[in-house]
Image (cartoon, rainbow, N blue to C red):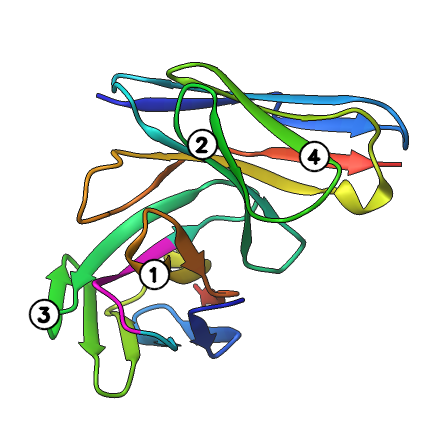
Amino acid sequence: SQTIHQWPATLVQPVGSPLSLECTVEGTSNPNLYWYRQAAGRGLQLLFYSVGIGQISSEVPQNLSASRPQDRQFILSSKKLLLSDSGFYLCAWSTGLAPYGEQFFGPGTRLTVL
Amino acid sequence: SQQGEEDPQALSIQEGENATMNCSYKTSINNLQWYRQNSGRGLVHLILIRSNEREKHSGRLRVTLDTSKKSSSLLITASRAADTASYFCATPQGGSEKLVFGKGTKLTVNP
């Protein structure tokens, strides 16, 4: 069976510090991978998605970046965090096979920038 | 931009009652999905309904889809306190692998 891991679960960082959030998927090959951000009481905003190693599409201009160094690893980074980067970050995967179906989400990382 | 918009934003009911949540969307879709999110957790996929389907059931869940009105509803029958969560609808963006989520309905089931 497939599982998706995210870490850390919670993170408190000062403004201007770097960020690295990691997501890994087990039990599947060549998944589509996604990073979302969810502000308090809001819906999900798609930040990045990837259909393969080294292939990253950015949905929203910001000071965040994403990388996919391995097939089942997706990393969200920032060189200098802003207060507005606070939120709940969710990683998800899908099979990438049309017709496109459900996505499977990780447990999320709660980021607080102070 | 938001494709799906849920209604109501918040719903509070008693255990045993039915809960109905609605979702409206703007463009043509090939499927619509409902997800559940417990507070502070990731989303869990509940049910997917394809554009050529009008109704689908899964346990206590019933989903309808009206493509002429660009709307869907999620009905939870005989609700339980454990159903307390936020519920989101999502639709594929432009037929792609990307999903667009609504802002969700926060359901509270009181014991």
Label 3 vs label 1: CA separation? 19 Å
- Point out residue A7 in the picture as x, y percentages from the top left corner: 58, 20
Looking at the figure, which quarter contains the N terminus of chain A? top left
The amino acid sitting under disc 1 is Gly
Q: Label 3 is found on which chain of the structure?
A: B
Q: CA distance from mark 4 to mark 1?
A: 25 Å
Identify which residue is drawn at 39% across, 17% down.
Answer: A72
Is residue B49 shown left or right of residue B23?
left
**Viewer-proximal residue, B86 or B68?**
B68
Characterize the local packing of mark 1: few (<14), some (14-19) or many (20 or more) Cα atoms within 10 angstroms.
few
Instruction: Count up the numbered dots.
Output: 4
Tag 3 and tag 4 share a subunit: no
- Residue type at mark 2: give it: Gly
| Secondary structure, magenta segment, majority class | strand
Please give the residue where the numbered disc 4 appears in the rendered image: A64
Residue labelled with disc 1:
B94
Which residue appears at 63% of the width and 42% of the height? A88
Indicate the secondary structure of the residue bearing disc 1.
Answer: helix
Give me the chain letter of mark 2.
A
Please name the amino acid that badge 3 sits on.
Answer: Glu
Q: Could one spot residue A35 in this view of the protein?
A: no
Q: Which residues are drawn in magenta?
A: B28-35
- Of labels 3 and 4, the one closer to you: 4
In the image, B64 versus A75, the foreground residue is: A75
Q: Chain of mark 1?
A: B
